[in-house]
Image (cartoon, rainbow, N blue to C red):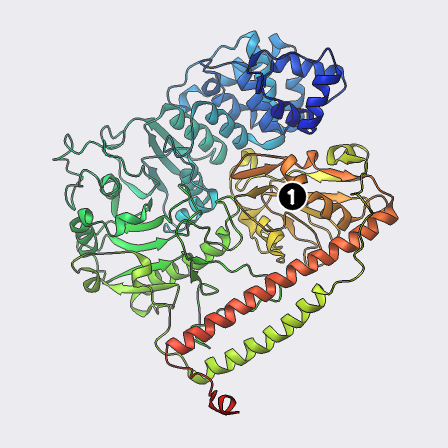
Amino acid sequence: MTAAEISRIAGVTRATVSNWRRRHDDFPAPSAGTESSPLYDLVAVQAWLRGRGHTSTASPTEELRTALRLLGPGSGVATRLFPLVASASRRTPQELAELATLPDDQLIARAEKSAGELPVAVPGAEPFRYGPDDAGVLRALLGCVREAGAQAALDVLAERELDEGAASGVYQTPEGLALLMARLLPAGASRVLDPACGSGTLLAAAARQGAQELFGQDSLPVQGQRTAVRLLLAAPRAETVVRVGDSLRADAFPDVTVDAVLCNPPFGDRDWGHDELAYDPRWAYGLPPRFESELAWVQHALAHLEPGGHAVMLLPPALAFRSSGRRIRAELIRSGALRAVVSLPARAAYPLHIGLQIWVFQRPEPGGTDRTTVLFVDGEGEQRDGAAGTPSATDTAGAGAGTRGGSRPRRSGSSASSAPASSASAASFDWAGLTDRVLAQWTAFTTAPDAYADEPGVARAVPLVDLLDDVVDVTPARHVRMTAADIDPAALARRVQDLYTQLAEQVATLAAASASGGWQPSGPAAREWRTATVSDLARGGALTVLRAAPSGTRGSKGFAAPTVDRPVLTAQDVSAVNPPSGTAVDLHADAAQSVAAGDVLVRALGGGGEAAAMTRVADDRDAGALLGPHVHLLRPDPARLDPWFLAGFLGAEDNIASASTGSSLVHVTPGRLRVPLLPLEEQRRYGEAFRRVHELRAAVRRTAALAADTAATLTTGLTAGVLLPPDTSSSDSA
């Protein structure tokens, strides 16, 4: 392990580790690496730290990663532990803690018995035997399931076998995207297939929507095993069948037809079997070109559907316009199989550099009603932050016109940039807002296609005949009109005047928040103070910490979202200074925990070039809300810690960096954040200063959003011919 990894385990800085090396003769000597980049034996370092009274501050997932690394390459223990995750998820935290304290031989015997209970459900699994060297990883696994959840442990084990990312082409479907795709299926879809199931995210989302029979196949054995265990966790009462193999070349379900297909297939696969499958009966819409593997997956999905069944697939944007696929696109449109195309912002899902699309298909029914239109939803526009006091852009395109999807999005300037203004990753993406916008359009379109009214800048239903031109381009941005055809000039003029009034008031508020005064230098040099970690403060009773959980974590009882009548506070609300905006599906694993005024909220994820705040103090608007995913909650003792003092120092860039792991997307470990040890009275002085900084940041966000809304409304009015430029002749002559 490196010096940086030692610092993460010990909860200290790298400078401290370097100091230990110089000052302590008994510090373990490097066992590998180079003189400039030495590597240390993990066991020796852990023993040295224990001898000095240093407890590990690593998260449970990091502890499990470390234990797996100790076993060395080729041990195969990761996949051998998959069934044990399912077994551990059925036990209470107290039972898991007791198991972890058993002697090695008893722990190994219990693990072998538990893992042997589930081999039939996991493809390729068989009764396992564990050796003495596995005791450490077994304890780490139990701790990870107890503290972070079974799904987190499952993902860490899969990391051991997979190289997820651009090099391997293996990506996880974000939870929010999976739920959106599942909710595009009809309510009665009970039998669902994913022929490229990967980590099982889509099938788990289908189970949350009520699917009772789940079929999955993947070409990678580790992914098939991962999906099988995940579905045992997410849908223990569903009938699950998971197979390993190439779905196009060796379909494991050749005679199975289902109500629905959910799929995020491989992109750009040139070796999908074009020559050997040239006469396959699945190609009802035409032989897929060699470089259009996605069209093979589309027809594979349609072939497995019952007549009238739906398929929802995540596909690359080039599929919508590439000339090689034009004939098959035309047949899909002409037959009525293509129902909708939804564009997603770049960075909403992997690979992050392109904006993917959701295509919705429906297998034609013999003698069924003719379908005359295809729905296009443009989700690539910038998502509004919705900060308190920010005006809505709902009526920008057509004042007074009714809307189904919320605020009107604006197109992003670059497909390689983050579409949401302050979101840099799929994990922090505003899936709730996008889901509401898309589902509103899809529901209106499917409920009454003939009565569907287009929504400028959001969605449009296009007649089939208008799509069957020389290029058959089904890119949503090409078809969704940005302005309404019936804008009321007088109403838009009133809207502009109202925006100018709000903008003037907001500029005055910003000027007041920007007023300088009272800021004095600390002296000839920066102040120095003693600090303590959040873990130290928690052990001393100065505050309590509730660990954040990833979206979708529901424990062993599955993913069914409870019915709640309270809002949920999300990570996006923290950075955007919004009131709680989440719903029941965003609930933290500990749904009983309510947010109280004075709590300090810390985002669990950051990075990717984000400039948004990582912390803030909960106010009266947040009080009573439930804690959402990817948010750490710190509740300080007001007699010992000032909340704004705590939030200000915790949110410092250097503090966040030293307590984080990862590169483009960082995971914040709250226990490693450091806070100066100051008297309460001095804390309050700093806290008041941090509160003023927070108000300045919020005022800037509101002013910028309002100014952008005003400019967009003026541009719309001028270019649509409903506003006239101001008469400047009198001022010019003067």
Residue 599 vs 85, above or below: the answer is: below
Residue 523 vs 226, above or below: the answer is: below
Horizontal and vertical percent position of residue 608: 52, 44
Q: Residue at x 49, y 88 (%)?
A: 732
Q: Which of the 4 image quarters holds residue 341? A: bottom left
As drawn, is 561 to the left or to the right of 373? right
Horizontal and vertical percent position of residue 447: 35, 62
Q: Is residue 595 visible?
A: yes
Residue 21 vs 421, above or below: the answer is: above
Horizontal and vertical percent position of residue 623: 70, 55
Q: Which of the 4 image quarters holds residue 109? A: top right
Q: Residue at x 29, y 68 (%)?
A: 450
As drawn, is 664 to the left or to the right of 14? left
Indicate the secondary structure of the residue bearing disc 1: helix
Q: Which of the 4 image quarters holds residue 462? A: bottom left
Q: Residue at x 74, y 58 (%)?
A: 692
Q: Is residue 309 visible?
A: no
Q: Amino acid at mark 1?
A: Glu
Quarter of the N terminus within the rendering? top right
Q: Return the residue at label 1.
A: 653
